[in-house]
Amino acid sequence: MEWITSDGLTPYDEALAFMEARASAIAAGEAEECIWLLEHPPLYTAGTSARREDLTDPDRFPVHEVRRGGQYTYHGPGQRVAYVMLDVGRRGRDVRRFVQQLETWVIAALAEFNLTGHIREGRVGVWIERDDRPLRPDGGKAEDKIAAIGIRLRKWVSFHGISINVDPDLSHFGGIVPCGISDYGVTSLVDLGLPVTMEDLDVALMRSFDLVFDPEPV
């Protein structure tokens, strides 16, 4: 497993080209698995299920149409993106289980900061309950999204991955309906009052990875 951490802001097209090349090399047995931790300049991505009406401010930031699962997402400074290039063929060939492992990985990393993440049926990503806000009309707790998940497989090798909000400009999410969900908000680690740095989160992600994924896939 190779871990790559990039400083500064990585152009989206550069990241996409790298992921596609690396995924092909992994499938051919010419490269080892890889997780790439980075940040992007402000941009929106449109997955295969994106609805045009969910792009509410199309001129705000560049929009990249990509062939990963999901709808519209935002990437930008202060958000840790983890691109996950793993051989799912050697890890059980179970796409549903793989997505669940990504969700569990995010939740395990958040737990290192005493934060409880939740998975909700019908709502993609990882969610945080807000005790500091009024209950919803249905009596449930208010919830905000802190992490998004979207992957693509080619020859059983994954690319794209997860994004976790550390300290992005949350107003930038206002140009889209994130993941097509309009009834809930978006939050970040710093917005929740946690003085977490990007480096802190990277350590948590690396430390929790082997707790969720088999380090020696068959």
Image: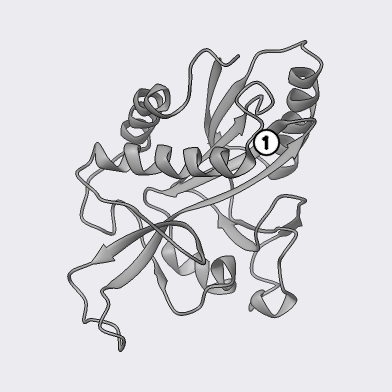
Q: How is the image coloured?
A: one colour
Q: Is residue 138 above or below residue 64?
A: below
> In percent of the image, x 48 and y 16: which residue is there?
215
The one nearer the camera, 203 or 104, is: 104
Q: Quadrant of residue 114?
A: top left
> In percent of the image, x 61 and y 27: which residue is there?
92
Residue 177 at x, y percent in the picture: 57, 73
Residue 36 at x, y percent in the picture: 57, 28
> In percent of the image, x 22 and y 49: which residue is there?
194
- Can you identify the residue that label 1 sits on? 159
The amino acid pointed to by label 1 is Phe
- Give left or right: position of 48 versus 150: right
Q: Is residue 31 visible?
A: yes
Q: Is residue 162 above or below residue 26?
A: below
Q: Quadrant of residue 111?
A: top left
Crowd tier of the residue under label 1, counting other residues whose Cα lies within 10 Å: few below 14, some 14–19, many 20 or above: many
Q: Residue furthest bottom?
A: 137
Q: Quadrant of the N terminus?
A: top right
> In percent of the image, x 78 and y 18: which residue is there?
25
Number of numbered tags placed on the structure image:
1
Residue 6 at x, y percent in the picture: 54, 28
**Secondary element at tag 1:** strand
Q: Is residue 203 above or below residue 8?
A: above
The one nearer the camera, 210 or 56, is: 210
The one nearer the camera, 77 or 196, is: 196
The one nearer the camera, 98 or 193, is: 98
Q: Quadrant of the C terminus?
A: top right
Residue 54 at x, y percent in the picture: 65, 76
Q: Is residue 39 visible?
A: no
